Image (spheres, rainbow, N blue to C red):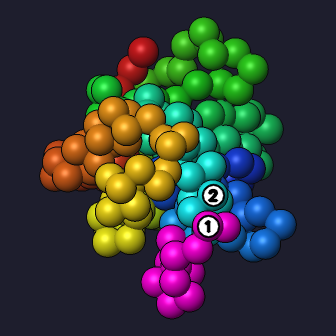
């Protein structure tokens, strides 16, 4: 069976980013810290900057990952298209190259990708909850100015739709 040994090389997901120099994985970690340590100007600035970047990156592609198939040596990019509510697969370096149906089925049916998709669904829904519990009030009060509120509202609306999250979690995929 193909795609038994996939290695995740790079990932992004709403509510998570690569940890910075402080060990914080984006605005969600800063918001969680505010729960115990209180809201400060410094934390507001970090949340504002990180949330703006996350919303911009996640609006069209809520989650994405670059994978290396250790058996074949091929590199793949998988992403969840928010407007189509489906996962898509590209050959890295050749986005116009056609990925065969059986490759899509094997890739999206693999254990490694399934783990990645479920983790993305968890991170994104946790991010929406943290936003509602900690950040929303501050955004509404005008303390966060860099965030595109329309795009953020759209992301949060999508995360409130069961089918959207189910497709994200269950690796439902489409073809270009």
Q: Is residue 73 above or below residue 7?
A: above
> Given the current orientation, which residue lies at the most extreme bottom position?
36
Neighbour class for label 2 at 10 Å: few (<14), some, many (≥20)? Answer: some
Q: Is residue 91 above or below residue 57?
A: above
Q: Is residue 28 left or right of residue 172?
A: right
Q: Say whether marks 2 and 1 touch (CB < 8 Å).
A: yes
Residue 139: x percent and y percent? Answer: 39, 53
* x and y percentages locating residue 66 in the rendered image: 67, 41
Q: Nearer the viewer, mark 2 or mark 1?
A: 1
- Residue furthest left in the image: 162
Residue 16 lies left or right of residue 7; in this view the side is: left
Helix, strand or loop status at disc 2? helix
Residue nearer the viewer, 168 or 52? 52
Is 90 located above or below residue 122 in the figure? above
Say which quadrant the C terminus sits in. top left
Q: What range of the chain is rendered magenta?
A: 31-42
């Amino acid at each position: 069976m193909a795609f038994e040994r996939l290695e995740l090389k790079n990932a992004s997901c709403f509510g998570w980013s690569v940890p910075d120099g402080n060990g914080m994985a984006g605005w969600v970690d800063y918001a969680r810290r505010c729960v115990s340590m209180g809201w400060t100007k410094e934390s507001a600035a970090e949340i504002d900057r990180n949330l703006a970047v996350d919303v911009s990156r996640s609006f069209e592609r809520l989650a994405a990952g670059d994978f290396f198939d250790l058996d074949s040596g091929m590199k793949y990019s998988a992403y969840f298209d928010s407007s189509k509510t489906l996962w898509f697969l590209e050959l890295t370096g050749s986005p116009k190259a056609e990925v065969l149906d059986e490759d899509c089925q094997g890739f999206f049916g693999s254990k490694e990708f399934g783990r990645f998709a479920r983790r993305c669904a968890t991170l994104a829904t946790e991010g929406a909850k943290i936003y509602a519990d900690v950040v929303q009030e501050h955004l509404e009060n005008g303390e966060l100015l860099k965030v595109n509120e329309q795009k953020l509202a759209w992301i949060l609306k999508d995360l409130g739709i069961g089918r959207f999250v189910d497709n994200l979690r269950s690796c439902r995929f489409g073809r270009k």
